[in-house]
Image (cartoon, rainbow, N blue to C red):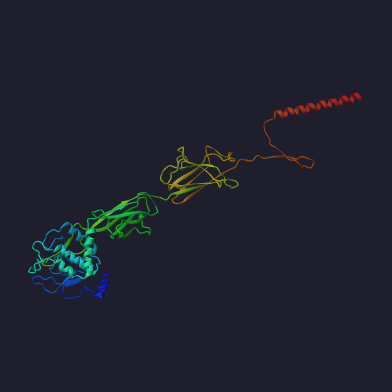
Amino acid sequence: MGWRRLAGAVLAAGAALLAVPAMSDAQAKEGIGYTTPAQGYRDKSGTTDWIGSYIWQDKHVWCVEYSLLAPDSSEQYQPGDELRTKAGEALAPDVAANISYLLLRYTTDPSADEAAALAHLLHSWTAFPHGSISLDPDNDFRHIAYNEQFHFDALPPSARDAVTGLRADAEANRGPWAVKVTAPEKEQLIGSPGDWSVDIAKADGKLVADVPVTVELDQATLEDGRTTVELRTPADGAALSVKVVPTGVRPTVKVRLDSPADKPVVHVPANSDMQRIVTTGGEKKLAAEASGTARTQPGAVKVGKTDAETGKPISGVALRVTGPDGVQPALKQDDAPLTGPDGKPIVLQTGEDGTVAVPDLRTPQEICVVEVAAPKGYEEYFDPKAPPKACGRVEPAQTLALAIANKPNKPIVPITIPAGADGTGVVATAAFTTEPDTGGMIAFGGLVLLGTALVGFFVRRRTARA
């Protein structure tokens, strides 16, 4: 889409000729850029120069030895030589860094303005007047220097703006770069996203904007479930923030990217009179990774205390929360023991609804809830050596429901004694006892003695009357 869009836009504007040449017998093929008036030198053929890319074996390439023969697709090139000036001198380190950055940034789908600006800057930095290379028009093509101002003025305004922009971009963002991945400071929860950051920094410590980065995740995913994705650093130069969802206890984020090479390399032709070319050879592979820690989501326990016969809740029951052995404390989400002020496993009381909840527990773990003392009315069946308890496994993000029922004491059976001839009237209640009541026995004896005395009195009285 990029080439057709650019070609259509430039042709419609009519500002300059965007070359998309047809097939011909000539092997040298111009790519995208602009035709400008020729810079003169001895034996110069033609009245125009081409400022832009060339097509070599179906690739866009840029030349770095102004006025030598255009690259021929039938010519074999050997890669890997260090880029030098037209006179064979080493490039200044900042110039080499600028070129590497621009080759990395602008050789893939450039606009006509960007392609021409890149070609202009490459010639300006490699074929400037120096050594045996000069602007003397009597020089031949091997020794003529690139007239930077002449060619800059010949470019259309949009391309001149691109020259200024590319130069500033290279000065601001050239290498070397360094990449760093930073995990969240706090431990993450499995299944919950956290913010990881990717920093791509220049030599001055500032971050590089709008750089493509390949992100790979292990024991983690993005929020949409992907484990590999290509992202770009923010255009404002901020760090790249990545939402990472751990799926295991050690989430790891790896990043890969192309950065500017320390020194650009060129492809060298067998024919010494043909231009050396550069393509995407300005990159260096960078990689970094970081690992964090994650744990499962916390769980909870809810205990219900009820009457074994009626099912009604029992409030105010003291329950101790322990590990599976019933002695050691359970663990909170942060792995701290769940203890009370005395340092022992925490004791909680059921509320009016007969329940008590224990949140924020480490998962998975076995939990036991042990009754500390019998509630009032349930003492008869409570064994302090084997108190009622319930145990279970707390799972991530789940609430474990436990239930403990208490059997009530046996009721005291009342005895009723009817009063009155028909058995109706006041009802008295009494309870049997196995111990004799001494006071009662004495009273009973007194009543017997009193009755005997009264019988003797009545007998004596009858005898006197006779």
**Figure label count:** 0
Vertical relation: 160 (above or below) 222: below
Vertical relation: 81 (above or below) 2: above
Residue 207 placement (x, y as % from top left): 27, 56
Vertical relation: 26 (above or below) 226: below
Asked whether 421 or 425 is in front, the reply is 425
Residue 382 placement (x, y as % from top left): 56, 39
The answer to whether residue 121 is visible is: yes
Position of 187 compared to 460: left or right? left
Position of 416 compared to 391: left or right? right
- Furthest residue to the right? 466
Asked whether 382 or 209 is in front, the reply is 209
The N terminus - image quarter: bottom left
Residue 281 placement (x, y as % from top left): 20, 61
Residue drawn at the location 22% of the way across and 63% of the way down: 166
The C terminus - image quarter: top right
Position of 174 compared to 338: left or right? left
Residue 394 placement (x, y as % from top left): 46, 48
Asked whether 111 or 415 is in front, the reply is 111
- Furthest residue to the left? 138
Q: Quadrant of residue 243?
A: bottom left
Asked whether 406 or 163 is in front, the reply is 163
The answer to whether residue 56 is visible is: no
Q: Quadrant of residue 436?
A: top right
Q: Quadrant of residue 83?
A: bottom left
